[in-house]
Image: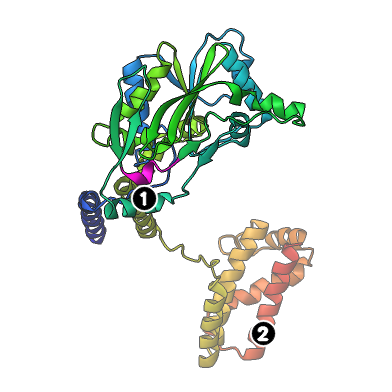
Amino acid sequence: MERRKLVKGNLKFIVFILLLIPVMFYFEQSFTKEFSWDASFNKNDKQPFGCFVFDDVLSSSLKGNYSLSNKTFFLLNNDSTARPKAFLVLSDYAFMDSLQFRSMVSLLRKGNKVMFVSSTFSPYLVDSLRITAHNSFIAYNDIKAMTRQTRKRKPLFLCNSALPSKVYRFYPQICTDFFSQVTPNEPKMKDESKDKREHTWLSEIPSTVLAKNKEGFPVAFSKKVGKGELFLVSTPLLFTNYGMLDQQNAGYVFSLLSYMKGMPLVRFDSSETKSEAKETPLRYFLSQPPLRWSIYLSMFVLILFMRFNAKRRQRIIPVIEPPVNTTLDFIKQIGTLYHQKKDYLGILRKKRAYFAKALKKETYIDIEEEALTMDLCHRLSNKTGMEAEKIYKMLKDLELTQYDIPIDEKTLKDYIDRMNEIITNSNK
């Protein structure tokens, strides 16, 4: 009955917790979501400055001609079987070392196109073009607050003859960067080193301004390099979820990408391998606060249930004491009782009965069933090694105990000693 009550109590507790989980899920979903305004440019990031929408739209629009890669320019340049492609570098900082820069130039000469969309550019790229990339260094977490304060949008102008000129308006906080000295008129220095001239020859190629800001500074331009073309864009945040979903301004992004049409488009994403490794069902559940808390609560309830269930099933293991031989204590108590009453004859009769059983056990001779003869005594003599006459006399005296003959304590002790002697010799 008590066990049944415990089971019912546990079931009620579990049902209560299971009903509590959807309630917590509902309230968690009802709370205001806090967005992260850090720029990740990750294909799986649905935060404002992730690229989930950008990659999803291009994948469905280009239908098999859009992909992501984590290979470097060096690896791509060594692939002799690849056909010309258009490469898009979308990041906060377009890093390149000398080897990657030379590999990129080699790809451009082979007919590939490369578009860098970033706020900060590698010194190899900036120095070779002899341009200045102006960066405002606005903290991403402050953009939301600044957008609330400044509702006025800033225009960006598409100004290339290949496309119809059009004006797009954005919040100024996400398009503050621009270029200067795109077409330098500086003459080459006579004492300029050969290595430096090798890196600055790109500045001699005419530039084509694709878009500019209200002040007239370029925010996107291109250069023909061999059979390919190099593009630089200073507004990376417009390519994120925030920019793609900002009114009708996605047309600005597609207008710039239209210069790379006719080729398979590959976007560099260094986090592709890591993100794919992390995209497991459990990782998704842990990334969603309501689901994460439901998992934590379920695990807590499971551990709590296991603890109480195990505690209820445990039984105290009793300490089993070795069996105590109480026969000797009983004999002592009985003997003490007879001795206090001075019933020496009664004690002797009890001792005689015990003596007969012990002797039968050791010698297989029953003195109570067989008549007392010398033949019996000789057999006992052979078993005990004692004289037959001595055994006969002792047994003859014991037969007198069946009569009510009073004896004293000394006589009792003498009888007991002689019986013990026979038993002791029979054990040898």
Residue 382 x, y percent position in the rendering: 77, 58
Q: Is residue 172 magenta?
A: yes
Tell me where residue 125 appears, x and y as whole percent.
59, 31
Return the disc, 2 or 1, that comes first in the chain's sequence. 1
Quadrant where the C terminus sits is: bottom right
Residue placed at 44% from the left, 12% from the top? Answer: 263
Stretch of the chain drawn in magenta: 171-177
Q: Position of residue 111 (x, y in %)?
A: 54, 11
Q: Which residue is mark 2?
A: 413
Question: Could you tell whether 135 is left or right of 81 in the image?
Answer: left
Q: Nearer the viewer, residue 156 or 174?
A: 156
Against 280, is 58 above or below? above
Where, by quadrant of the figure, is residue 189 drawn?
top right
The reply to whether the magenta stretch includes residue 336 is no
Reply above or below: 357 against 33: below
Which of 215/8 is in front? Answer: 215
**Image quarter (top left, top right, bottom left or bottom right) of the N terminus:** bottom left
Q: Residue at x 57, y 75 (%)?
A: 328
User: Between marks 2 and 1, how big is the CA–CA gap?
Assistant: 115 Å
Name the amino acid type tagged 2. Lys
Q: Could you tell whether 362 is left or right of 67 in the image?
A: right
Residue 88 image offset from top left, x and y in percent: 47, 25
Q: Which residue has dot 1 on it? A: 143
Label 1: element kind: helix
Q: Is residue 73 visible?
A: no
- Does dot 2 land on a helix, a strand or a loop? helix
